[in-house]
């Protein structure tokens, strides 16, 4: 078993004439993974760090960093309910000028039911509220969350393997609508809102047909089923610098080389057509990437973790992870 792991994060801000990144190294005796980050100003960014003992008993830390110096300014523990264990994926969204909303998965210790944990903090990391929502009898394992043009949280994920999930929730986490899809794919990983045409684009992960849905927002029905490049495992979608396209990033499996993954992203127009594909070779390493893709001005930032070891798809070996930062920067096209 390997005893090292580099998690590559982006600590970035725009300056006149270009962009800049900073490095910060952190290590504990626990199993540390940063799942999401959000830049709140030209001086500060916030990060969610999940830590604990694999595969459960996790806690989550929200911390703020000065991106001019790399120094940690403040931090708070997000989850401490003794009736639940905190698990895995988290997402940070800025829902107004000074309100951070953080999403995580938690599991009821008594029933093993997976539910959604929502916490709200202001940008000074002052606690405002937190709540646990979701069906008490059906697992709601979300992967992606967006804040829609309608002022709703939209979540993608799964109820169980092969049952894809799409939910709309109010600003307080109350369920507005829910739809499930069963045609292929392990779960719904990546979500993009086309507010111009009133559609959602929903990407399926580990899908035999490497496909994604264009969904009508009016009734959540499937409008069109399209395909993305074979081998791509989509994890993150961001708006492009133009209004008629967006980007989707993730890992790209190298066919015939099971120990090698590349970082990759694609450019997609609002009709679902693949405009271009980029793939970055990693010298026979396995990479892992989650919410680590961004567009800042004329630059695209993509980052991943290497080397990444797996005991099964979507599952890390129990091992310490050293958190560092670096950048892979390409001109946006």
Image: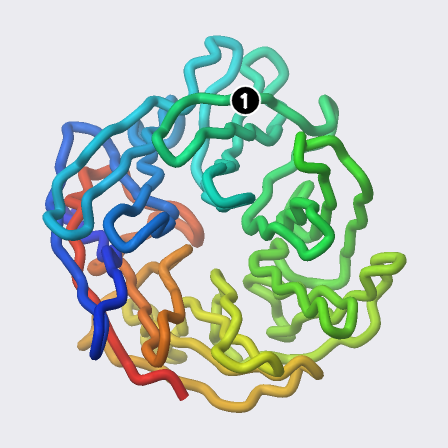
Residue at x 80% of width, y 39% of height: 176
Q: Measured from the top left, where is residue 115 in percent x and y?
A: 61, 28
Disc 1 is placed on an element classified as strand
Furthest residue to the right?
219
Q: Nearer the viewer, residue 309 or 108?
A: 108
Q: Position of residue 24 (x, y in %)?
A: 12, 48
How many numbered circles are shown? 1
Q: Which of the 4 image quadrants contains residue 304?
A: bottom left
Label 1: few (<14), some (14–19) or many (≥20) C-alpha neighbours in 10 Å: some
Judging depth in this view, the residue of 211 and 79 nearest the camera is: 79
Image spot of residue 316 (x, y percent): 33, 45
Q: Nearer the viewer, residue 295 or 95?
A: 95
- Looking at the picture, how far across and down is residue 83, in whole percent? 52, 10
200, above or below 71, in the image: below
Report the side of 215 relative to 33 (left or right). right
Q: How is the image coloured?
A: rainbow
Residue 65 visible at all: yes
Specify whether 265 is left or right of 33: right
Q: Residue at x 35, y 80 (%)?
A: 298
Quarter of the image where one finds residue 63: top left
Taking the image as shown, residue 165 lies to the left or right of residue 122, namely right
* Quadrant in the picture for residue 269: bottom right
Q: Where's the N terminus, which quadrant?
A: top left
Q: Is residue 58 visible?
A: no
Write the residue at 66% across / 54% down: 148
Q: Which residue is mark 1?
A: 130
């Amino acid at each position: 078993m390997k005893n090292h792991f580099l998690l590559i994060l982006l600590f970035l801000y725009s300056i006149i004439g270009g962009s800049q990144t900073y490095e910060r190294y952190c290590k504990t005796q626990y199993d540390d993974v940063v799942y999401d980050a959000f830049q709140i100003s030209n001086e500060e960014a916030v990060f969610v760090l999940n830590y604990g003992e694999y595969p459960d008993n996790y806690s989550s830390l929200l911390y703020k960093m000065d991106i001019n110096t790399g120094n940690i300014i403040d931090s708070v523990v997000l989850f401490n309910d003794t009736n639940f264990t905190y698990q895995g994926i988290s997402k940070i969204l800025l829902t107004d000028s000074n309100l951070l909303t953080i999403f995580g998965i938690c599991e009821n210790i008594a029933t093993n039911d997976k539910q959604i944990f929502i916490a709200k903090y202001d940008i000074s990391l002052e606690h405002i509220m937190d709540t646990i929502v979701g069906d008490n009898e059906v697992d709601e394992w979300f992967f992606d969350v967006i804040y829609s043009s309608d002022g709703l949280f939209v979540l993608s994920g799964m109820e169980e393997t092969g049952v894809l999930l799409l939910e709309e929730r109010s600003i307080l986490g109350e369920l507005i609508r829910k739809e499930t899809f069963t045609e292929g794919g392990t779960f719904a990983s990546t979500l993009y809102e086309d507010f111009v045409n009133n559609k959602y684009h929903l990407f399926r992960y580990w899908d035999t047909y490497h496909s994604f849905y264009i969904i009508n927002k009016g009734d959540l029905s499937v409008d069109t089923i399209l395909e993305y490049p074979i081998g791509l495992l989509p994890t993150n979608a961001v708006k492009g610098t133009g209004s008629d396209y967006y980007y989707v990033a993730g890992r790209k499996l190298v066919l015939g080389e099971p120990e090698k993954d590349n970082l990759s992203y694609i450019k997609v127009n609002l009709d679902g057509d693949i405009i271009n594909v980029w793939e970055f070779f990693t010298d026979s390493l396995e990479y892992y990437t989650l919410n680590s893709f961004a567009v800042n001005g004329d630059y695209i930032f993509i980052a991943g973790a290497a080397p990444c070891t797996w005991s099964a798809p979507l599952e890390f070996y129990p091992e310490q992870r050293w958190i560092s930062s670096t950048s892979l920067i390409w001109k946006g096209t």
